[in-house]
Image: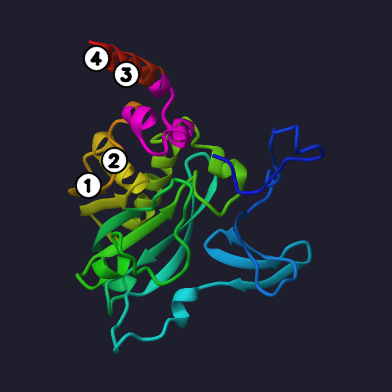
Amino acid sequence: MRTCCADRGPGAGTDQRHRNLTAGMPACPVDLVQDDGDAPIMVVATGLDTEFHRLGRGLLARVTGGHRRQVSLGGVRWGHQERLRYQASDGLELDALLVLPVGRTRDDGPFPLITLVHGGPYDRWADELQLQWVPSAQWFAHQGFASFLPNPRGSLGRGHEVAAAVAGRVGQEEWHDIETGIDPLIARGVADPERLGIAGWSYGGFMAAWATTRTDRFKAALVGAGISDWPKQIAHGEWGGASRTAAPRGAALRTRRLSRRGALAAAA
């Protein structure tokens, strides 16, 4: 669960230890782009927005509310999208998006609400047009559903400490962050408590499945490529080492037992 900048320091040829250069930052660098041979541009996720910095020279631009500048696709109308801020149960400030059905406002609620959990967990929902190949808020908006897109702890965009908070604890505090964000939407008449669903892909798929074991408030769950067995994921998955960082404590021990059983079976 490292953020992206590291420094091998003096004597890097012999000292292979890394140190985190983003500790204490309230945002997360996500990419370096070389454009004209000058110092590269650093792309930074900051909450729901995206910033562009010339490396070592400061801010170039900040993109806020990118969905409002989308070119119309053949006159297709989009559901209204708004930014949300709310507090977790322990007081941590969180951000999210709300997408309403096409042509509707909050006053037309309550709506059936689908909570969309992003992958990662080191990823985020940014304030851009929510039209993706994974379960998409704008797909649902055209079917009369509202969508809640939370960025719980573990997400990209709030700094290393928030991102690393889920290491070894997936399905714990960040699950409560997601559920806490639904409650005010119900209280304000936006969401119908009897018509709630949850969906996601990859880590979001895991969280959608996990949600059905934590509460009975969701009437449907869409699980896309979600992890259902952490020990097997660590032992045999393509990203086994990375999965070990996020996996619940105790999964590593079960993985060792699983690996021993596999070795015995292969030798038999």
Q: Amino acid at mark 4?
A: Ala
Q: Is residue 189 visible?
A: no
Q: Which of the labelled discs sits on residue 218, or is there none?
A: 1
Which of pointers 1 and 2 lies earlier in the amino acid sequence?
A: 2
Q: Is residue 120 magenta?
A: no
Asked if the residue under mark 2 is in contact with the one under mark 1, i.e. CB atoms within 8 Å, the reply is: yes
Frontmost of labels 1 and 4 is 4
Question: Label 3 is placed on what type of residue?
Answer: Leu
Element type where label 4 sits in the image:
helix
* Numbered label attached to residue 265: 4
Mark 1 vs 3: CB contact within 8 A: no
Task: Provide the residue designation for mark 3.
Answer: 258
Q: Is residue 66 left or right of residue 5?
A: left
Q: Which residues are magenta?
A: 232-252
Element on which disc 2 rests:
helix
Residue 243: x and y in percent read: 43, 35
> Closer to the camera: disc 1 or disc 3?
3
Q: Which mark is residue 211?
A: 2
Q: CA distance from mark 2 to mark 4?
A: 34 Å
Comes first in the chain, label 1 or label 4: 1
Mark 3 element type: helix
Give the spatial CA distance, label 3 vs label 2: 26 Å
Dot 1: what SS? loop
